[in-house]
């Protein structure tokens, strides 16, 4: 079994094995549907190079990773390191659509209305001790 097959779990993600992991599969999906997700990167080492992907834009980073026990894609929208919204998609096309919409300037409210699997994270002020 290849490294990519072992990392992904062929049973859950057979469609990600041939392209070589999550990041290249996301690039191919975005291209096939003419979605601008920007540059897609993955960690260079270890299992996560097959199971994680990031799309960085001026608005922040869309981080995607794979569920290990069931097939789903975990999406975090991060701005300055803080998670603004998160969700679990069941289809790679949904991931590409969220990333493209975020990159294009959709607001968090519009994003969560359009993609009900995404949830805006509520912010709680942090008291700083002086």
Image: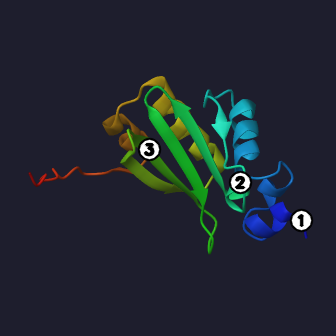
Res. 118 in view: no
Give the residue displayed 67% in from the left and 49% down from the top.
43
SS class, disc 2: helix
Give the spatial CA distance, label 1 vs label 2: 14 Å
Give how far across and how far down residue 90 sits, in percent.
59, 57
> Tag 2: Cα neighbours inside 10 Å, few (<14), some, or many (≥20)?
some
- Give residue 2's mark: 1
Give how far across and how far down residue 121 sits, in percent.
31, 51
| Mark 2 or 3: the one toward you | 2
Q: Earlier in the sequence, mark 2 or mark 3?
A: 2
Give how far across and how far down residue 89 sits, in percent.
54, 54
**Front residue of 114 and 67:** 67
Query: Which residue in the structure is indicated by mark 3?
Result: 77
> Tag 1: Cα neighbours inside 10 Å, few (<14), some, or many (≥20)?
few
Q: Earlier in the sequence, mark 1 or mark 2?
A: 1
Give the spatial CA distance, label 1 vs label 3: 31 Å
């Amino acid at each position: 079994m290849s490294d990519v097959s072992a990392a992904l779990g062929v049973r859950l993600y057979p469609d990600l094995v041939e392209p070589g992991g999550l990041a290249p599969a996301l690039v191919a999906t975005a291209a096939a549907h003419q979605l601008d997700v920007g540059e897609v990167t993955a960690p260079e080492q270890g299992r996560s190079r097959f199971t994680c992907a990031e799309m960085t834009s001026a608005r922040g980073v869309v981080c995607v990773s794979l569920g290990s026990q069931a097939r789903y894609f975990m999406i975090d929208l991060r701005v300055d390191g803080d998670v603004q919204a998160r969700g679990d998609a069941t289809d790679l096309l949904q991931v590409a659509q969220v990333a493209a919409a975020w990159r294009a300037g959709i607001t968090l409210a519009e994003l969560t209305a359009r993609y009900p699997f995404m949830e805006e994270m509520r912010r709680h002020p942090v008291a700083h001790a002086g």
